[in-house]
Image (cartoon, rainbow, N blue to C red):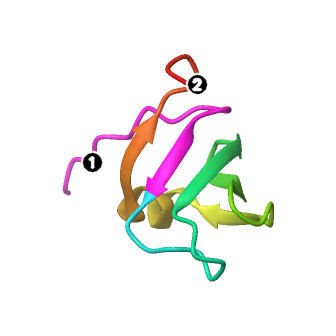
């Protein structure tokens, strides 16, 4: 069994993704975190749910809520 380290992502963080959203923006605001994430695109404000495993695989970096 492979050991995976869970990323420390919480509500209010901004995720910079490897791939861009269809609107052209690659920053997503975390609205909810758990087994899946509810994200909002910073560019077009579209909200969507994505499984945690898929989201963590596609995250380039995380901007914490306190930093912004």
Q: Nearer the viewer, residue 67 or 55?
A: 67
Q: Residue at x 66, y 46 (%)?
A: 29
Label pair 2/1, CB-CB below 8 angstroms: no
Circle 2 packing at 10 Å, graded few (<14), some (14-19), many (20+), is some
Tell me which label, 2 or 1, sits earlier in the chain. 1
Between marks 2 and 1, how big is the CA–CA gap? 24 Å
55 or 5, which is in the foreground? Answer: 55
Give residue 3's position: percent from left, percent from top.
21, 47
The numbered mark at residue 39 is: none
Residue holding disc 1: 4
Which residue shows up at 50% across the image and 74% down it? Answer: 20
The stretch of residues the image draws in magenta is: 1-16
Give me the residue at 63% from left, 65% from top. Answer: 50
Tally of numbered tags? 2
Magenta region includes residue 40: no
Name which quarter of the figure residue 25 lies in: bottom right
Element type at mark 2: loop
Name the quarter where the N terminus is drawn: bottom left
Please indicate whether residue 24 sits to the left or right of residue 48 in the image: left
Q: Is residue 42 left or right of residue 15?
A: right
Q: Which mark is residue 65?
A: 2
Provide the secondary structure element on which disc 1 rests.
loop
Q: Quadrant of the C terminus?
A: top right
Furthest residue toward left: 2
């Amino acid at each position: 069994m492979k050991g995976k380290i869970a990323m420390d992502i919480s509500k209010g963080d901004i995720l910079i993704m490897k791939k861009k959203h269809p609107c052209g923006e690659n920053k997503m605001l975390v609205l909810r975190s758990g087994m899946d994430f509810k994200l909002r695109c910073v560019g077009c404000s579209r909200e969507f749910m994505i499984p945690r495993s898929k989201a963590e695989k596609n995250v380039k970096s995380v901007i914490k809520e306190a930093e912004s």
